[in-house]
Amino acid sequence: RIPESSEMSISDTKEPVRRNLGSILATGTQIVCPISQLGLSLSAGYSYQYQSKSRYEGINVVSDRISLLEGLEPMQELHSLVTSIGFSTVDWYQKKSFAVPFQMNVVYSRPLGGRNAPIGDVIAGEMVLFL
């Protein structure tokens, strides 16, 4: 349901459209400082992400309407500072001094710049239990 104008979110008619998400590139670098006796690791790094503009093709669709869709998903680029702290018992488990092998990580990402990308900080956490 392709919009018929910029004020309209969707149209009343359904039309077959093919979507090409474009290219995605993500790369980064990181320095890790392990503190083995405490099971900790600290890291800091840089991340770069790029996504090209999404493209749409329709059989019976006017190109102006296709450009409305393409305007919703423009090219995106993001540069970020990434820091993390992790805790792991895997080494202790291998030495038979801890009963359960697991890892916990908290990652903080702060955008440094970019185009058409989120500008908010991101905090993520994960816990991995090895069975």
Image (tube, rainbow, N blue to C red):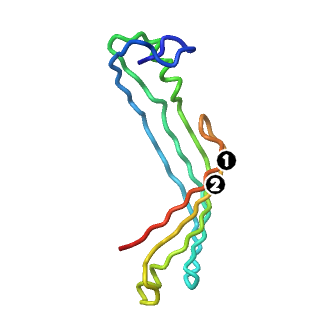
Mark 2 nearby-residue class (10 Å; few <14, some 14–19, many ≥20): some
In the image, residue 91 above or below residue 61: below
Q: Mark 2 or mark 1: which comes first in sequence?
A: 2
Q: Quadrant of the N terminus?
A: top left
In the image, residue 40 above or below residue 74: below
Question: Total of numbered circles in the picture?
Answer: 2
- Report whether 105 appears left or right of 130: right
Where disc 2 sits, the SS reads: strand
The structure residue drawn at horizontal position 34% and vertical position 10%, both measured from the top left corner, is: 60
Q: Are marks 2 and 1 in contact (CB under 8 Å)?
A: yes
- Report whether 42 appears left or right of 89: right
The structure residue drawn at horizontal position 49% and vertical position 48%, both measured from the top left corner, is: 26
The kind of residue tagged 1 is Leu
- Residue 125 x/y as whole percent: 54, 60
Image quadrant where residue 41 sits? bottom right
In the image, residue 26 above or below residue 4: below
- Which residue has dot 1 on it? 112
Q: Nearer the viewer, residue 13 or 78?
A: 13
- Which residue has dot 2 on it? 81
Q: Nearer the viewer, residue 113 or 95?
A: 95
- Report whether 49 appears left or right of 90: right
Q: Nearer the viewer, residue 130 or 64?
A: 130
The structure residue drawn at horizontal position 55% and vertical position 36%, both measured from the top left corner, is: 76
In the image, residue 54 above or below residue 109: above
The kind of residue tagged 2 is Leu
Where disc 1 sits, the SS reads: strand
The structure residue drawn at horizontal position 61% and vertical position 47%, both measured from the top left corner, is: 79
- Residue 108 x/y as whole percent: 62, 57
